[in-house]
DNA sequence: GCTTAAATGATAATAGTTATCATTAAAGTT
DNA sequence: AACTTTAATGATAACTATTATCATTTAAGC
């Protein structure tokens, strides 16, 4: 009855990212966001937005659903997916896809950043490098492209996971 | 009976990448590759490798399967997936994932490169920028990471697709 | 040719995500 | 506050890409 889809396997479970404390956002700001997208303000949408701004910075749809399930046992799975997709399309949320793993979402911070991920423990470090950003623009321009987006994900082993996979790749 | 999974929807069908002529690789070189992975040399594996080195540079498992189906009507779908995965794990092939679309594979060229993709027509341009590569190493080192891999995909509109989505994103 | 373990292909299973559609609720309107 | 309209919701089915299963075949060493 009240059993929802089970936890994702693999790296998702051992995900060790530290909880991030972001500046709190008021409900009235959320409501404006929602109205700006041309949508109606619902309990569900407010709850999803609140959930995104506390705890882990990068969460899966599954995790959002589970977080909300305590206070909102009536929350539907489809609603979470639907709204996360909308938020991504409208640019309020960044969607991160790594390998074939479930997509992770994060509320867009004021500053753009990219990710450095540990392939052993799943830790995610956020970084911002203006030199790289400029070079990307330069590359795009050189090929006659108007740049709209980019994905830069660095993978490696963090200092806590030094041993494994050191020489895995040729 | 002889119907295989249908074509993937969306961008995959309008994919306009030009055919790339790579230097031809001999079967004996392929055989060495296969043996180097500790695998047996089979008709199927040779056929997959040959297929990867002609036509489009970036192909889906589906497309590989369809290309082979003419000459190898007995080729199984699972074999294509299995071998592509193995090739990726062993570093002979690069796996490209964009959005939620099916993964694309390409035989690893001698030189590393990244991709610039048109979000309208699907055209893929390969580029290599040593400055960016160095900066990535620098970023990783600064966070105590040992870099093992990275994904850099630039998205935009090419000069042939100037009109659409210009102001889509906030 | 014989042996043995690995490879194959048909098929089922899985995971993540999206579509469908009857029911509910937001937000104007009176 | 009741009424109306239309979007939103949630249960569920459907879909897509990929992986696992397993009986059968085949490569490769003897
Ligand atoms: Mn982030
Ligand atoms: Mn390429
Ligand atoms: Zn780690
Ligand atoms: Zn284009």
Image (cartoon, coloured by chain):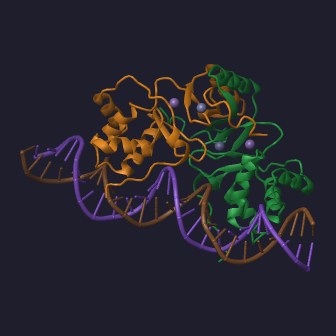
Chain colours: A orange, B green, C purple, D brown
Which is more toward the observer, B118 or A10?
Answer: A10
Q: Position of residue A31 (x, y in %)?
A: 30, 33
x and y percentages locating residue D3 in the rendered image: 11, 53
Q: Is residue A58 above or below residue B85?
A: above
Question: Does any portion of residue A29 appear in the rendered image?
Answer: yes
Picture coordinates of residue D6, whole percent (x, y): 28, 51
A100 vs C21, nearest the viewer: A100
- Quarter of the image with the N terminus of chain A is bottom left
The quarter of the displayed image where residue C4 is located: bottom right
* Any part of residue B17 in sight: no
Q: Name which quarter of the figure residue A161 lies in.
A: top right
Q: Quadrant of residue A29?
A: top left
Give me the residue at 50% from left, 23% from top.
A111
Question: What residue is shown at x 73% (from left), y 56% (from top)?
Answer: B83
- Relative to residue D29, is residue B97 drawn left or right? left
Indicate the position of residue B78 as horizontal and vertical percent values: 68, 63
| Of C19 and B150, the residue lying toward us | B150
Left/right placement of residue A115 relative to residue B18 reads left
Quick one: quadrant of the C terminus of chain A? Answer: top right
Determine whether, in the image, residue B11 is placed left or right of residue C29: right
The residue sitting at 84% across, 60% down in the picture is B41
Q: Quadrant of ligand 2?
A: top right
Tell me the residue at 64%/56% (across/down): B13
């Amino acid at each position: 009855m009240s059993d929802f889809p089970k936890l994702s396997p693999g790296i998702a479970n051992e995900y060790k990212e530290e909880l991030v404390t972001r500046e709190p956002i008021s409900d009235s700001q959320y409501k404006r966001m929602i109205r700006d997208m041309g949508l109606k303000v619902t309990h569900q949408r407010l709850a999803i937005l609140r959930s995104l701004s506390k705890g882990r910075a990068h969460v899966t749809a599954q995790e959002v659903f589970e977080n909300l399930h305590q206070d909102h046992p009536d929350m539907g799975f489809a609603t979470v997916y639907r709204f996360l997709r909308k938020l991504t399309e409208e640019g309020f949320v960044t969607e991160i896809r790594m390998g074939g793993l479930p997509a992770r979402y994060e509320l867009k911070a004021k500053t753009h950043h990219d990710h450095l991920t540990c392939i052993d423990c799943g830790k995610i470090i956020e970084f911002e490098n203006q030199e790289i950003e400029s070079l990307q623009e330069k590359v795009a321009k050189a090929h006659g492209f108007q740049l709209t987006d980019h994905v830069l994900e660095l993978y490696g082993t963090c200092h806590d996971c030094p041993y494994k996979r050191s020489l895995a790749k040729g």
